[in-house]
Image (cartoon, rainbow, N blue to C red):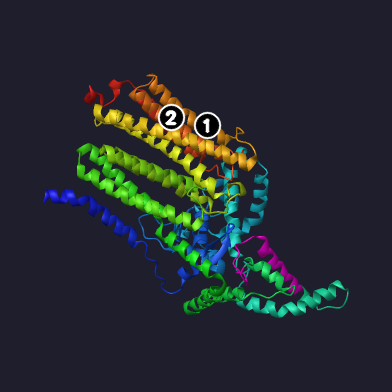
Amino acid sequence: MKKIFKKWAPPLAAFAMAMWFFAQLRAPHDKDFAFNGFGQLPVVADGRLKPMDSLARTSLLQIDEMQELDLEPWKPGWQSHQTLSAIQWLANVMLNPQVADDWPVFRVDNPDLVTFLKLPEKDAGTHQDGEHYSWNQAAPRLDAFDKENERVDKISPSERNAYERDVIMVHERMELYAQLKNAVQPEDALDWKSELARYENLIAPGVAAVQAQQAGKKYDEQTFNDFVGELQRFNFMAETEPPLVVPPAQPGENWQRTGTVLLGAARGGEIPQAVADYADMAEALQNGKAAAFNAALADYRSSLVPNLSPALARVRAEVFFNQMQPFYNAMVIYVLAGLLAIFSWFNLSETLRRSAVWLVGLAFFIHTTGLIYRMILDGRPPVTNLYSAAIFVGWGAVLLGLVLEKFHKNGIGVVVSAGIGFITLIIAQNLSLDGDTMEMMRAVLDNNFWLATHVVVVTTGYASTFVAGFLALIYITRGVFTRTLDAETGKSLARMVYGIVCFATLFSFVGTVLGGIWADQSWGRFWGWDPKENGALIIVLWNALILHLRWGGMIRERGLMNCAVFGNVVTSWSFFGVNMLGIGLHSYGFTDAAFKYLSLFVLSQLAFIALGLLPRKMWKSSQVRS
């Protein structure tokens, strides 16, 4: 019985987690309002066609840093909370803002900013948690907040204090919310369907009144004022630059904003049926009529089929990708696999090690599926920005770790795979807080050949450098804090690190040369000492230096490990850090929000190097190796 358990436990563990993953692929069921159907409507935002579901998720992440809205944030974490999905939240913001404006969606942590906006303090009696606030709570101070933002915006980003940085961040979140509120109707609309009908009837007499006023003739002042007032509302809608929700009337035409087409109607254009369909949805949602909402939604979707069938298919595929959440689910499995592999070191359990291998294999399959699916959706190679780079670095590191485990079968490769896979996907998840991760490419990057050669090759080199550094962290951790680093294990780790550094040197060098060729075609010079180019060169030189030190006998086992750990510092700064400088040809709008975490990572690596330099007698493993 024990032998049977040892044989079948690993595949059964992987099967159980696979069933957990596949269970999440089932689309959520709508109880009444077809919000999931609303999530499959196409919209143009951030320079690309996407489903409302993606717009909802990225917008809520930017505003609240979550993909679900907690309507009761004041409750303790252990109590059950009433929550809304991202698409339920977005549908109400667009169609029923009178309700959505009372939801605590804005996260404001800075106490000075809370005071400036005159927001309520934490009070369980008034259902206020002191961190999350609604649009209506901040609305009385919006004019003053706009002026404060203008003042802070004139200050250099590097010179802003914590309060000023939060002013910019919260103002951007409120601007995004205002854009969403003005996407399908004016933000101050109370009964948009009736107001739209009145506007249609007002166009002809309104235009006549305006023409008469301009000609100095007698005109109906009430009609003139009503008409001009409506035009001002629609002009404000258009100026907020909301997502484009009005589809093209004919193939090849462009998507438009609701405010733009309503202004165009005053110049003789027609109001598209899509505007009326959204108005029907708004009326139904505001009055709690699920059947009417679903009918209006179905009518609108059917009107899109003749001209936009490919677009509908694409947004359905992206909605499924959002539901699958491959990178988040792979991250969860990496954690479980890593824990099993670490435990296997202490009790020498082959069953735990094999279970960890099976689980990493499953997570790698999900990781790979998500990577390929994303490439198909984006129509690009795997690396296009920092978010996708983090995902690809993790994928490459997991693959290298599995190869190491195939040859050495000691659990080290599995821990490398699980550890780097988890860390890189956590980084990617935090990078997604900045907005759409499949945004429109800059012109210089709009070249799939070089994205598939230079970027993929050089990123593989960086991933390999991280793998070598992670192996060295394992060596130091096991050596200093445990008795599991015997002489054989130490030599095995040294061979792994040496081999991976050789691999990393080759790929980082070839990738850097390919980048120079791309630069020559893009900017007319092979090398310009740009910060990003310098970072790539430093990585190549550091890996080459490690090899020369090893070949020359200047470093041995522990020296090799310390140098490999410092490779983590070099690579993290050269790969991520230079993008935070905001200068150079390779600064494509990347964020500096992760600077604090990058600094903490660098300090942690320096701390590990300090541990690695401790005398051997201070290592717990010295008792085993002596």
Answer whether residue 249 is magenta in the image: yes
Residue 586 has which mark? none
Most extreme residue toward the right is: 216
Residue 47 sits above or below residue 521 on the image: below
Give the structural element (helix, strand or loop) at label 2. Answer: helix
**N-terminal of the two: label 2 or label 1?**
1
What residue sits 22% from the left and 37% below the top? 346
Residue 566 has which mark? 2
Q: Is residue 596 visible?
A: yes
Give the structural element (helix, strand or loop) at label 1. Answer: helix
Residue 172 is situated, as x and y percent measured from the top left of the image, at 59, 52
Type of amino acid under label 2: Phe
Type of amino acid under label 1: Leu
Span of residues in magenta: 225-251
Answer whether residue 84 is magenta in the image: no
Q: Residues within 10 Å of mark 2 (few under 14, many from 20)?
A: many
Classify residue 230 as left or right of residue 316.
right
Classify residue 335 as left or right of residue 506.
left
Classify residue 209 as left or right of residue 36.
right
Q: Nearer the viewer, residue 371 or 595?
A: 371
- Residues under numbered marks 2 and 1 in contact, where contact means CB atoms less than 8 Å apart: no
Residue 440 is situated, as x and y percent measured from the top left of the image, at 57, 54
Q: Residues within 10 Å of mark 1 (few under 14, many from 20)?
A: some
Q: Nearer the viewer, residue 30 or 373?
A: 373
Residue 156 is situated, as x and y percent measured from the top left of the image, at 64, 40
Q: Nearer the viewer, residue 470 or 364?
A: 364
What residue sits 46% from the left and 72% below the top? 34
Which residue is denoted by mark 1 in the rendering?
537
Residues at marks 2 and 1, CA–CA distance in whole angstroms: 16 Å
Q: Is residue 128 visible?
A: no
Give the label, 2 or 1, closer to the camera: 1
What residue sits 67% from the left and 63% below the top? 238
